[in-house]
Image (tube, rainbow, N blue to C red):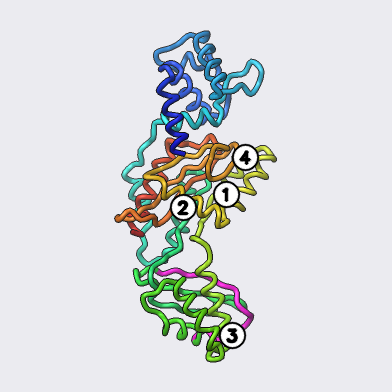
Amino acid sequence: MQKEMMAGTDYLARMDGRSAQVLKEIVEQYLQSGDPVGSRTLSQKLTPSLSPATIRNVMAELTRAGLLFSPHISAGRVPTEKGVKLFVDGLLEFGRLTENEQRIIAARLSLEGRSYNDLMADASSLLAGLSKAAAVVLAPKNDAAIRHIEFVAYGPSRVLVILVGADGQVENRIVETPPDIPASALTEASKYLNARLGDVTIGGLRQRVKNEMRECRQELDQLAAQVIEAGLAYWDEGHGTLHLRGQATLLDDINEMAHLSSIRRLFETLETQEMMLKLLHSAQDSDGVRIYVGAESELFDLSGVSMVVAPARSKDNRIVGAIGVIGPTRLNYGRVVPVVDYTAKILGHILG
């Protein structure tokens, strides 16, 4: 991505001011309307004004450069994904959040009285609402030491696992268990694990219990052992927890059936471990917001879709999450980028 941005910046440096002005105006109008932009319309918008003939010559040059294309004969031009990418890398003017919007975000993302997981879920819902697009919030696996674990009956075949970290964060998960687990088995499972806590992460606890249970499984009730294995396996899986909200908004923006099928595959891909790793790596490699446009994306190869992603960093610069917005290429980048950036900073401050 950094190489792509440098290449785009170099191209802009070589582009004359008139070409940059025409490209900027075409992309901005296209992002607003989705319609092709003609030379006559541009001649009325540009300052200083240019004649339609001059604008047509510039548009032809930008088309040859792969930045514009004409969807119909004798129609205006629309930007290619390469053209949009060049625009967001060097020509886009970002908006600013109002003080009231900042207060609303900060208030909604307060950790007080809520679990870490609930906070991240609410962040994704908030981001989807503010951006009018699909939102992704990824929390890396919590590696803090564990202070307390509790198993609580949640239904005929479900158990609520409550985990309290040494840092005070509380996380909850619902796991599938054999039907009708008695309360005594849940109590025994909780006591067994809490007796083995100390300066140990969930991964370390799982390995410690795994080694012990090979040798002395008979000391545990069979159902209690199954509860322990199910709970620890769930918590230790993967590289983080991903929250995805606002999918319907993105689907509403996609009209072509081919794109609809691709979007559905994208949502399936987003929840895989590979995509979580890519999101985290993207965040780790970035000091701020990064914009991926369409098929050029390092995260997914899908034409017509863009992603804006930013790391949530703690005060000591640790990655505590990755935050992103997914929308059509016609995403309102000037609005979305400051929303993603501020939300990421707030989450980083709260969780760090």
Q: Is mark 2 on a helix, strand or loop?
A: helix
Residue behind mark 2 = 280
Q: Which of marks 3 and 1 is in front?
A: 3
Q: Is mark 4 on a helix, strand or loop?
A: loop
Quarter occupied by the C terminus: bottom left
Query: Residue 175 in magenta?
Result: yes
Q: Nearer the viewer, mark 3 or mark 2?
A: 2
Report the residue at 47% width, 47% height from top: 324
Give residue 223's mark.
Answer: 3
The three-letter code of the residue at mark 1 reads: Gln
Q: Which of marks 2 and 4 is nearer the N terminus?
A: 4
Q: Answer with left or right where residue 350 lies relative to residue 46.
A: left
Q: Which of 64 and 95 is in front in this view?
A: 64
Q: Which of marks 1 and 4 is nearer the N terminus?
A: 1
Give the class, few, some or many, for how many residues have Cα within 10 Å of label 3's Cα (few <14, many ≥20): some
State how far apart marks 4 and 3 are (Cα). Answer: 48 Å
Report the residue at 54% width, 50% height from top: 246
State how far apart marks 2 and 1 are (Cα). Answer: 21 Å
**Above or below, comparing residue 193 to residue 337 in the picture:** below
Q: In which quarter of the image is residue 222?
A: bottom right
Instruction: Assess whether mark 3 and mark 4 are in contact (beta carbons under 8 angstroms).
Output: no
Q: Earlier in the sequence, mark 4 or mark 3?
A: 3
**Above or below, comparing residue 218 to residue 32 in the picture:** below
Residue behind mark 1 = 247
Q: Answer with left or right where residue 71 lies relative to residue 85.
A: right
Residue behind mark 4 = 254
State how far apart marks 2 and 4 are (Cα). Answer: 27 Å
In this view of the protein, can residue 210 be seen by the observer? yes
Give the class, few, some or many, for how many residues have Cα within 10 Å of label 1's Cα (few <14, many ≥20): some
Q: Which of 130 and 93 is in front in this view?
A: 93
